[in-house]
Amino acid sequence: MPAHVLAVIDHDCPGTEDMHDPLYFCVGLRLQFGGIDLVLRGPAVSSALVAADGPAPPEGNGARLPNPQRYVRSLVRAGVRVWVDDADLAGLRRDGQVLIDGVRTADTDAMAARWNEYEEVWFL
Amino acid sequence: MDGQTGPRWDLLLVVTSDQYGSVRFGTVRRLIDTALRSGHSIQVWACGEANGLTELGPAGAGHSPGEGSPAAGSRSRGGKRPAAEQIGALAAGNVGRFTWLACQTCSGERGAGEHVPGLPTPSFSDLRDYVAQAAKTVFIGGA
């Protein structure tokens, strides 16, 4: 069952701690609207990629992920379903990079056919 | 909010960055003018960098995305930013048809000063209510 709100981000997320960062805004949106789904397309797909052999730092040990990846991981842990576009992922993923645990891949063009299942679609 | 259940405003415009909000305030201004000219009501929710558009203060004080440039976000000699003056005048001249909402949560996070008097300063937690009371919400902020 889809959430009420679908958020779509299709441009680069700088990772600033400010509402003008789309992922930061998305964290606020989840708090406001409860269940949301998130689709990352284009350059935004990079926000869901981490080094496969890098440390997986637990919260609070001082080893921080860059903000975009931290926001995505935080959203996944909060129960947000996050998809990245599979075609964009193929073009952006570098050797040794993997998706953040819990992030799924999809043909997000095809997902547009399901937008009407959501009460709101936000292009952040 | 006044507890009405149906949409009370035709359009809610959410602005968060200086890309469309402050340095290029003209984009938002044109959307406001177009909505009003076509007989629609419009509210603008200003988060993030755009929150500073209606901030008041002494000339040169505080932070501004547009400082150092002739952008709308920078302060005029009198202390107000040009955008703040425009927004204040628009709100005063279009009561019930135009409101600028300076997100109080963003103001707090950014250490902002006073905003143009008379403008609502709702918390970010009120955003959902404003969305519910708008027939259409358009988000044009972003990085």
Image: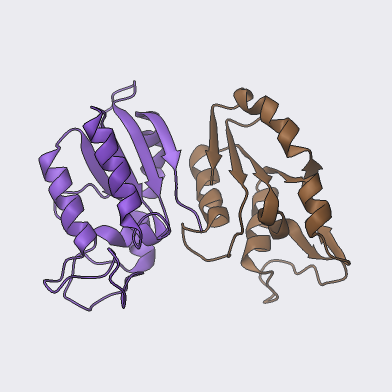
Chain colours: A brown, B purple
Q: Is residue A29 visible?
A: yes
Can residue B115 be seen at all in this image of the molecule? no
Q: Residue furthest top?
A: B6
Quarter holding residue A22: bottom right
Q: Residue at 32% x, 56% y: name it.
A: B25
Q: Residue at x 36, y 69 (%)?
A: B65
Q: Quadrant of residue A69?
A: bottom right
| Figure check: B136 above or below B64 | above
**Residue drawn at (62%, 66%) of the image:** A67
Residue A5 in the image, given as x and y percentages of width and height: 57, 34
Residue A99 coordinates in the image, percent (x, y):
80, 56
Image position, residue B133 (x, y; %): 34, 29
**Would residue B120 appear left or right of A33 to someone viewing this image?**
left
Q: Nearer the viewer, residue B97 or A54?
A: B97
Of the pair B31 and A50, the residue shown nearer to us: B31
* Res. B67 image quadrant: bottom left
Q: Is residue B79 left or right of residue A11?
A: left
Quadrant, the N terminus of chain A: top right
As displayed, is residue B113 above or below residue B6? below
Please state if B20 lies on the left or on the right of A87 as rendered.
left
Indicate left or right for B143 with A62 as reference.
left
- Name the foreground residue: B120 vs B66: B66
In the rendered view, would you say B34 is above or below A69?
A: above
Q: Position of residue B136 (x, y in %)?
A: 40, 30
Number of marks present in the image shown? 0
